[in-house]
Image: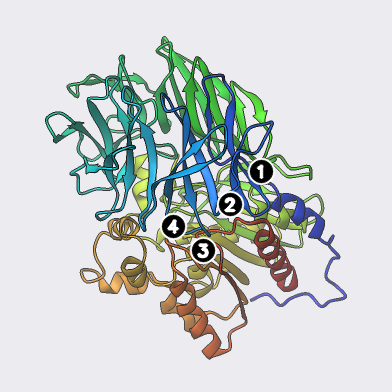
């Protein structure tokens, strides 16, 4: 471990308090819809919670976070979600647009989300819930209250689309691995395989939920069956399909526009471009940043845009409608680079550089693992750069955006070669002159941080946010569908592969942690429960290892509330600066 610089030799850095507060106040839009008179209704953060509003007025003032509004045609109201303290236990609500009055649709202990109205019956919706086991597809009559389960697949339902006449539903069964499409006939009460090619994935739901995937022109989806990349395809009602656009790049969340074009997202390094396919030609609506929550409405394309300078603006055809997520402080756009890992594999990464000579380096590990580091406003990263650190954010093995082979490279090997890619990132920073290198990550990135400081000697300090500590207890205590994902990634249950679960769990290496460690946890986290962090805290305390533990009782899987963000980011910057 590199010894810290003596106090009189440490470079003076600007105090980040004002900078942190400015970034922490940027929350962005959390879902939106359009009313028949083309008014945009969206969820915005104010005074500790999200509520629904238009650009002219606030519509709701209720307990919990009210998000993801959807216009209910024929009922002239809004359907929305409510979550309290980050539990991700969404209730379904109906909101009167004129008065803001809220009527409970579903208020129980289950996760109820991805709700969407029937295309011809205004009193019926479909939604996804974990009320029976993992994630299944249901329909609900809004007035009568009767709920009917519609899906029969063993895999979790990640998204769905209504047929134009509302007589059928097509849904995506499976997350990232071997996902396929299934077809539900509501009149025959049948659920059959629709498209399920071997050794590949067929999908239309990634960050979105299948909105707009079915029109009179067919069902649009992506498949990597032929090229290994997610290419655009269109199927008829019998499951026969053809590829519509192929360019050996991963694409996500395709949907139809009113004039028969296809709007979709395409991976380009840290950017997720928003594109439109029309008569075989592709035009780009938004070239940079992380674009999501796309909706083609009345001939226009709406979406949420995130970048290094915004936490989530609502845009229409490339023009900002609602600038809720914009920050006034200077932020740094990353440079796209690549470096070689231990076996010569090229690893794509984003490099953030401070204005002056860096005081140290930080490897920022993304969550997932099937995700990547997007060009969006990462507040901890921006503040670290502002404080004088050089930050490298790698898309290690198992990341999205680089084809099926690269994404599957971590299957059965979590904390293996992907961790070595992260270690190679630390070496890359040291070769650039960084004498002190730390690691920071959240969720799976938090797991990588814990493995980095315990199972390797590559780092001088580490910080983990909501990071997995013990794979066995994570499978036992997290929500079922998340446990299913873990078992799939580790290719077996804890009983089938006890040695692998032990070898790849940070708790196994607690005796080897000999560098300062910061642990951050949400008390209501349903994905990585508080009990995970406390396993590690107890062991670190017993051995008197230099560590700090920040527990936020009113947060879930991440730190979202402004006051909590300020405390978390401030302490993180202080922690790394003290040990640089």
Query: Measured along the vertical axis of the image, is residue 435 above or below residue 90?
Result: below
Q: Which residue is mark 4?
A: 418
Q: Which residue is mark 1?
A: 334
Given contact means CB atoms under 8 Å apart, are the residues at marks 2 and 1 in contact? yes
Q: Quadrant of the C terminus?
A: bottom right
Where residue 227 sits: x, y (%)? 32, 30
| First of labels 4, 1 by sequence position | 1
Of helix, strand and loop, which one carries label 4?
helix
Of helix, strand and loop, which one carries label 3?
helix
Where residue 504 sits: x, y (%)? 38, 69
Residue placed at 47% from the left, 61% from the top?
Answer: 420
Kindly report the distance in space between the C-alpha atoms of the residues bearing marks 2 and 3: 13 Å
The reply, left or right, for residue 170 in relation to residue 554 is left
Query: Measured along the vertical axis of the image, is residue 328 above or below residue 572?
Result: above
The reply, left or right, for residue 448 in relation to residue 476 is right
Q: Which residue is mark 3?
A: 446
Of helix, strand and loop, which one carries label 2?
strand
| First of labels 2, 4 by sequence position | 2
């Amino acid at each position: 471990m590199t010894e810290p610089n003596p106090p009189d030799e440490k470079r003076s850095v600007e105090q980040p308090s004002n900078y942190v507060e400015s970034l922490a106040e940027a929350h962005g839009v959390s879902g939106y819809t359009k009313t028949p008179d083309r008014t945009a209704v969206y969820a915005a953060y104010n005074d500790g919670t999200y509520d629904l509003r238009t650009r002219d007025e606030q519509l709701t003032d209720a307990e919990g976070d009210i998000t993801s509004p959807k216009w209910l045609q024929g009922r002239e109201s809004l359907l929305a979600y409510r979550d309290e303290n980050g539990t991700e236990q969404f209730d379904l609500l109906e909101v009167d647009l004129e008065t803001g009055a809220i009527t409970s649709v579903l208020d129980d202990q289950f996760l109820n989300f991805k709700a969407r109205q029937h295309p011809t019956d205004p009193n019926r919706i479909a939604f996804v819930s974990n009320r029976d086991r993992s994630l299944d597809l249901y329909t609900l009559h809004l007035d009568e209250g009767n709920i009917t389960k519609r899906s029969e697949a063993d895999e979790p339902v990640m998204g769905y689309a209504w047929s134009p006449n509302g007589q059928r539903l097509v849904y995506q069964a499976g997350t990232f691995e071997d996902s396929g499409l299934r077809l539900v006939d509501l009149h025959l009460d049948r659920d059959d395989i629709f498209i399920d090619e071997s050794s590949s994935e067929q999908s239309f739901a990634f960050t979105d939920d299948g909105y707009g995937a079915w029109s009179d022109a067919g069902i649009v989806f992506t498949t990597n069956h032929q090229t290994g990349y997610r290419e655009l395809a269109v199927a008829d009602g019998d499951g026969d399909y053809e590829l519509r656009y192929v360019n050996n790049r991963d694409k996500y969340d395709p949907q139809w526009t009113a004039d028969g074009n296809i709007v979709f997202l395409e991976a380009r390094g840290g950017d997720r471009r928003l594109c439109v396919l029309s008569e075989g030609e592709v035009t780009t609506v938004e070239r940079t940043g992380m674009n999501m929550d796309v909706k083609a409405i009345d001939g226009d394309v709406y979406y949420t845009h995130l970048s290094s300078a915004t936490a989530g603006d609502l845009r229409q055809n490339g023009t900002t409608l609602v600038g809720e997520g914009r920050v006034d402080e200077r932020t740094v756009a990353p440079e796209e680079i690549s470096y070689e890992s231990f076996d010569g594999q090229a690893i794509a990464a984003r490099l953030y550089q401070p204005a002056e000579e860096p005081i140290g380096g930080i490897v920022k590990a993304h969550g997932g693992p099937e995700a990547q580091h997007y060009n969006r406003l990462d507040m901890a990263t921006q503040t670290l750069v502002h404080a004088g650190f050089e930050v490298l954010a790698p898309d290690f093995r198992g990341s999205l955006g680089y084809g099926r082979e690269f994404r599957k490279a971590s299957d059965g090997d979590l904390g293996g070669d992907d961790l070595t890619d992260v270690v190679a990132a630390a070496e890359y920073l040291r070769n650039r002159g960084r004498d002190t290198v730390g690691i920071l990550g959240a969720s799976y990135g938090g797991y990588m941080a814990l493995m980095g400081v315990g199972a390797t000697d590559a780092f001088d300090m580490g910080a983990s946010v909501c990071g997995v500590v013990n794979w066995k207890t994570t499978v036992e205590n997290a929500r079922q569908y998340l446990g299913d994902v873990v078992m799939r990634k580790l290719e077996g249950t804890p009983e089938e592969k006890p040695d692998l679960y032990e070898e790849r769990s940070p708790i196994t290496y607690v005796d080897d942690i000999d560098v300062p460690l910061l642990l951050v946890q949400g008390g209501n986290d349903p994905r990585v429960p508080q009990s995970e962090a406390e396993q590690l805290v107890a062991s670190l305390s017993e051995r008197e290892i230099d560590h700090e533990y920040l527990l936020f009782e009113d947060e879930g899987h991440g730190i979202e509330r402004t006051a909590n963000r300020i405390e978390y980011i401030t302490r993180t910057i202080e922690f790394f600066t003290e040990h640089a």
